[in-house]
């Protein structure tokens, strides 16, 4: 007998366990039983052979029409077996086998079989060559018992471990299972009509009808959502027990003076979020809030007003940025916005002024020491920096608020390096310019309260986005470079964005444009005579700062750059952007990039250059970006078009998503329900002492690589 933690080798033997470990990363029975069917085939609705396409790897259920052997080769010693199969639609498919003469006697007309392989074509007809197959026998074997259920599970499989082998292995493990402890409490299951875990696993893998399979999937989806939401419920409960110093607003001090001198009025959305954060800062429980907003929605203003409230209350604030370019941009932008309010203790400073300091790894010793001294003494109310801020030697007199920009660039341990160092916990505000659908925010940022800025400030200029199909219409790309020259002729500036740097280490095999080659091509060709600079991650910090400063000052008219300009770069005079190989970027990333233009008084232009084919998924994504400037709508579409694991970051974390059935895009109602149940359960039993199986599942998730990624998102 076995449970979910039993090693597969102990149940199925070494010969089976090795390929499961190699191809799927499965080691214990739970790994195999949580490998749920990707779809089901109902025997009354056989696969549609007419829908197959060349190059597709297909698994089809079909009936044998005929099977014949043909001899070929010297002396006719070799055999080719041709099998013709059909389905309920009447479509036919040819199967070709070599040196398997006996198959013609086994694949008799009327026999039903599962075939799996890559679809090819020969003489204008679709065919499978040497497909894997599973022939159902009518003599009472296991295949026949599967037929009697009327529903066959189809699994994500490999050539060496096809779907029916997985089905067989899973069946053997199900037969060996002891009764299982269930992470879902009995009252939670009863309220929703769910069976226990053992029954759900049986029903999802060996259903007697689609209704049974769907019911089992619902239960297992809820379980996935419930375990994740319990993790976050415990984190929120732990935060409730922590203590911070209240930092309420102080009238007629820095924050009020700053707002009075703003040349514009805050939007209703900005005012609402400022008030939300102000209320949080006035409490003795540490704030943990996510501020998300459209490109150009004014997150920096909101964050700055929150920082000034904390400074007014006698504490300091730190702004942590992921790159030196972005940190320097924040420093220049904030000091410019504050004016004399940033000149604390200096000639010309306002009477309520504070001091703003920049701290990065590339600073000279004199500037760094001055920044460190002002942070430690409390003279600097605002300290802006990169990872250099979290070094042990960086001390604050009293850190009251940590603002983390582009939260997904930092690990939780990096954020904690500043938060945990202080005797009194500082408040934490994390920001992202990547709009996140609500259900994804609940699953990935479940321990944070979420504030959203949707509306754009008055005067924000529209951005026209156009897809440029370089292969189909090369003249459009030439016209694109002419548009860049026209914008520059009007005194404006432009970005050209590429996906890779290139240079000496480049093997030259990529079909995409490299920065090094494109910069050289443009300088000598399409943009000849213009002042064209380059910006990328291999440059030294001083080189990057100098290039960015030259572009901001207008000394450079065109900047050819990698995605280092994706966030935070603010050059109001830049009105045009050409994104080369745009299909290599995600939809949200493209939206971020184009948000760098149209930030001044003139409308923006963004050209998405691609060599992707008209009806390809890549072109579909680009067309979606061109069709709307609503970042939240794009984020939703992006999540729908991508694989679920990528949405949750499985690609970045290097492991499979812990969510196998739950869709964070489509299952918002399940996530809402699970969150409410988890909150109530944790409120009554914070340590989960009455729910040991749930506690074990939570522990496993908390200590997995997937949880490590969730903390970084």
Image (cartoon, helix red, strand yellow):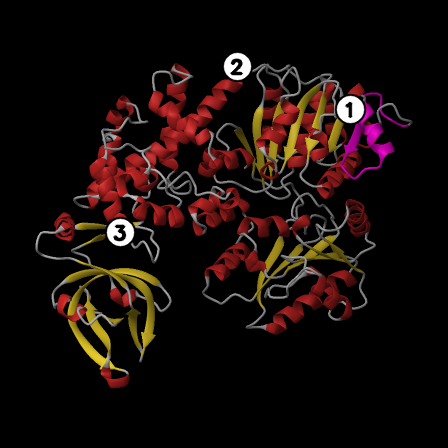
Circle number at residue 241: 2
Q: What x and y, as percent, mark residue 464?
A: 61, 57
Q: Residues within 10 Å of mark 1 (few under 14, many from 20)?
A: many
Quarter of the figure with the N terminus: top left
Q: Which residue is mark 3?
A: 165
Q: What x and y, as percent, mark residue 646?
A: 47, 46
Spatial distance from mark 3 to mark 2, Cα to Cα? 51 Å
Q: What x and y, as percent, mark residue 351?
A: 84, 21
Q: Earlier in the sequence, mark 3 or mark 1?
A: 3
Q: Residues within 10 Å of mark 2 (few under 14, many from 20)?
A: few
Q: In this view of the protein, can residue 550 be seen by the observer?
A: yes
Spatial distance from mark 1 to mark 2, Cα to Cα? 28 Å
Instruction: Between label 3 and label 1, give the one nearer the viewer.
Output: 3
Asked whether residue 367 is drawn in magenta, I would say yes
Q: Residues at badges 3 and 2 in contact (C-beta under 8 Å)?
A: no
Q: Which residues are magenta?
A: 348-373
634 or 362: nearer the eye? 362
Q: Residue most toward the right?
A: 347
Instruction: Between label 3 and label 2, give the one nearer the viewer.
Output: 3
State the SS at label 3. Answer: helix
Q: Residues at badges 1 and 2 in contact (C-beta under 8 Å)?
A: no
Q: Which residue is mark 1?
A: 375
State the SS at label 2. Answer: helix
Q: Residues within 10 Å of mark 3 (few under 14, many from 20)?
A: some
564 or 250: nearer the eye? 564
Q: What x and y, as percent, mark residue 318?
A: 70, 28
491 sits to left or right of 243: right
Q: Earlier in the sequence, mark 3 or mark 2?
A: 3
Residue 489 found in image quarter: bottom right
Q: Residues at badges 3 and 1 in contact (C-beta under 8 Å)?
A: no
Q: Earlier in the sequence, mark 1 or mark 2?
A: 2
Q: In this view of the protein, can residue 251 be seen by the observer?
A: no
């Amino acid at each position: 007998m076995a449970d979910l933690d039993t090693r597969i080798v102990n149940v199925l033997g070494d010969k089976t366990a090795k390929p499961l470990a190699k191809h799927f990363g499965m080691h214990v029975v739970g790994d195999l039983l949580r490998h749920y069917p990707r779809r089901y085939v109902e025997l009354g609705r056989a696969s549609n052979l007419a829908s197959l396409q060349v190059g597709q790897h297909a698994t089809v259920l079909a009936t044998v029409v005929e099977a014949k052997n043909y001899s070929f080769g010297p002396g006719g010693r070799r055999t080719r077996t041709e099998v013709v199969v059909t389905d309920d639609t009447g479509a036919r498919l040819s199967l070709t086998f070599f040196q398997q003469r006996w198959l013609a006697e086994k694949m008799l007309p009327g026999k039903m079989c599962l075939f799996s392989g890559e679809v090819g074509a020969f003489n204008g007809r679709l065919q499978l060559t040497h497909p894997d197959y599973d022939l159902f026998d009518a003599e009472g074997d296991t295949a026949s018992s599967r037929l009697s259920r009327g529903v066959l599970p189809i699994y994500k499989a490999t050539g060496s471990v096809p779907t029916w082998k997985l089905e067989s292995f899973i069946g053997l493990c199900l037969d060996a299972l002891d009764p299982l402890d269930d992470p879902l409490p009995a009252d939670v299951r009863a309220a929703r009509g769910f069976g226990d875990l053992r029954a759900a696993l049986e029903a999802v893998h060996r259903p007697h009808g689609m209704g049974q399979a769907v019911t089992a999937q619902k239960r297992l989806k809820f379980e996935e959502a419930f375990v994740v939401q319990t993790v976050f419920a415990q984190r929120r409960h732990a935060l409730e027990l922590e203590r911070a110093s209240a930092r309420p607003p102080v009238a007629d001090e820095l924050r009020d003076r700053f707002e009075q001198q703003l040349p514009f009025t805050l939007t209703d959305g900005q005012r609402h979020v400022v008030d939300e954060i102000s209320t949080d800062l006035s409490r003795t429980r540490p704030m943990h809030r996510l501020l998300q907003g459209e490109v150009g929605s004014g997150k920096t203003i909101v964050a700055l007003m929150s920082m000034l409230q904390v400074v007014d209350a006698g504490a300091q604030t730190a702004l942590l940025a992921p790159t030196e370019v972005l940190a320097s941009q924040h420093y220049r932008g904030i000091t410019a916005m504050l004016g004399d309010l940033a000149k604390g203790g200096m000639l010309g400073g306002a009477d309520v002024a504070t001091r703003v300091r920049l701290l990065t790894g590339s600073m000279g010793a004199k500037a760094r020491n001055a920044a460190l001294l002002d942070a430690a003494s409390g003279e600097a109310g605002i300290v802006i920096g990169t990872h250099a801020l979290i070094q042990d030697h960086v001390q604050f007199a009293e850190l009251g608020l940590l603002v983390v920009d582009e939260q997904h660039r930092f690990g939780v341990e990096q954020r904690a390096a500043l938060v945990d160092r202080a005797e009194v916990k500082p408040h934490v505000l994390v920001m992202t310019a990547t709009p996140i659908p609500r259900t994804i925010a609940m699953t990935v940022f479940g321990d944070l309260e979420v504030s959203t800025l949707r509306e754009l400030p008055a005067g924000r200029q529209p951005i026209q986005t156009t897809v440029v199909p370089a292969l189909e219409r090369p003249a459009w790309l030439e016209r694109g470079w002419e548009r860049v020259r026209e914008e520059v002729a009007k005194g404006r500036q432009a970005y050209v964005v590429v996906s890779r740097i290139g240079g000496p280490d480049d093997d030259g095999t990529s079909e995409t444009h490299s920065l090094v080659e494109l910069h050289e091509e443009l300088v000598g060709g399409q943009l000849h005579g213009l002042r064209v600079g380059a910006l990328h991650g291999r440059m030294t910090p001083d080189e990057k700062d100098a290039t960015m400063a030259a572009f901001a000052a207008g000394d450079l008219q065109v900047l050819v750059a990698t995605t280092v300009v994706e966030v935070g770069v603010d050059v109001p005079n830049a009105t045009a952007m050409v994104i080369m190989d745009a299909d290599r970027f995600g939809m949200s990333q493209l939206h971020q990039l184009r948000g760098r233009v149209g930030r001044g008084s003139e409308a923006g232009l963004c050209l998405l250059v691609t060599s992707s084919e008209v009806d390809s998924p890549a072109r579909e994504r680009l067309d979606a970006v061109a069709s709307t400037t609503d970042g939240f709508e794009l984020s939703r579409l992006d999540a729908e078009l991508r694989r679920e694991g990528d949405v949750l970051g499985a690609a970045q974390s290097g492991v499979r998503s812990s969510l196998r059935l739950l869709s964070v895009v489509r299952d918002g109602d399940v996530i809402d329900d699970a969150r409410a149940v988890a909150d109530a359960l944790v409120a009554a039993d914070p340590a989960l002492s009455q729910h040991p199986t749930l506690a074990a599942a939570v522990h496993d998730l908390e200590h997995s690589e997937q949880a490590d990624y969730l903390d970084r998102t």
